Image (spheres, rainbow, N blue to C red):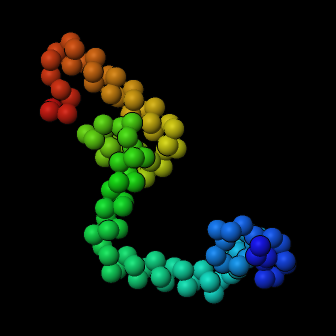
């Protein structure tokens, strides 16, 4: 069984770094290694803009799955521009959806169309 090269702690078979979790995290938090990792991410993003855009779109859709697409811009406005905490902004949007549904049931007119 493999051991950490720095402290001798036993490692699982899946470990490929040769370091225990503590030493791997310590090494990763050093400025030299952080700069190297950030540079690699920036280079990947520059070389693969379509993949990055696709990943961001999928991530956004899954995080905002609860929110209908026509209300997502409003939610982003509340959280980013107005800096309202996400749970509060979600409650505001859900109340807005409820109000628009009630208005639609009374008038037959969609709020988004107005």
In this picture, residue 15 sits left or right of residue 80: right
Q: Position of residue 82 (x, y in %)?
A: 44, 48
Image quadrant occupied by the C terminus: top left
State the residue lying farthest toward the top. Answer: 106
State the residue lying farthest toward the front. Answer: 1
Q: Picture quarter containing residue 93?
A: top left
In this picture, residue 109 sits left or right of residue 63: left
Instruction: Kindly identify the residue that appears in the image at 55 percent across and 85 percent down.
Output: 36
- Of residue 63 and residue 92, the one placed in the foreground of this image is 63
Tally the marks: 0
From this view, report whether residue 66 is shown above or below residue 24. Answer: above
Q: Examine the rendering and report whether any part of residue 58 can be seen.
A: yes
Q: Position of residue 61 (x, y in %)?
A: 35, 48
- Of residue 6 and residue 89, the one placed in the foreground of this image is 6
Instruction: Kindly identify the residue that appears in the image at 54 percent across and 80 percent down.
Output: 37
From this view, report whether residue 57 is shown above or below residue 85. Answer: below
Instruction: Kindly identify the residue that appears in the image at 48 percent across and 49 percent down.
Output: 83
Q: Examine the rendering and report whether any part of residue 82 can be seen.
A: no
Q: Position of residue 40 (x, y in %)?
A: 47, 82
Q: Picture quarter containing residue 57?
A: bottom left
Q: Picture quarter containing residue 47?
A: bottom left
In this picture, residue 52 sits left or right of residue 105: right
Instruction: Kindly identify the residue that appears in the image at 68 percent across and 68 percent down.
Output: 13
Image quadrant occupied by the N terminus: bottom right
- Of residue 30 and residue 112, the one placed in the foreground of this image is 30
């Amino acid at each position: 069984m493999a051991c950490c090269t720095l402290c001798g702690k036993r490692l699982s078979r899946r470990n490929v770094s040769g370091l225990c979790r503590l030493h791997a995290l310590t090494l990763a938090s050093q400025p030299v290694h952080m700069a190297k990792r950030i540079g690699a991410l920036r280079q990947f993003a520059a070389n693969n803009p379509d993949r990055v855009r696709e990943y961001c779109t999928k991530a956004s859709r899954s995080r905002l799955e609860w929110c209908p697409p026509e209300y997502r811009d409003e939610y982003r406005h509340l959280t980013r521009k107005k800096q309202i905490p996400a749970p509060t902004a979600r409650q505001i949007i859900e109340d807005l959806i409820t109000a628009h549904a009630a208005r639609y049931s009374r008038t037959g007119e969609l709020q988004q169309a107005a």
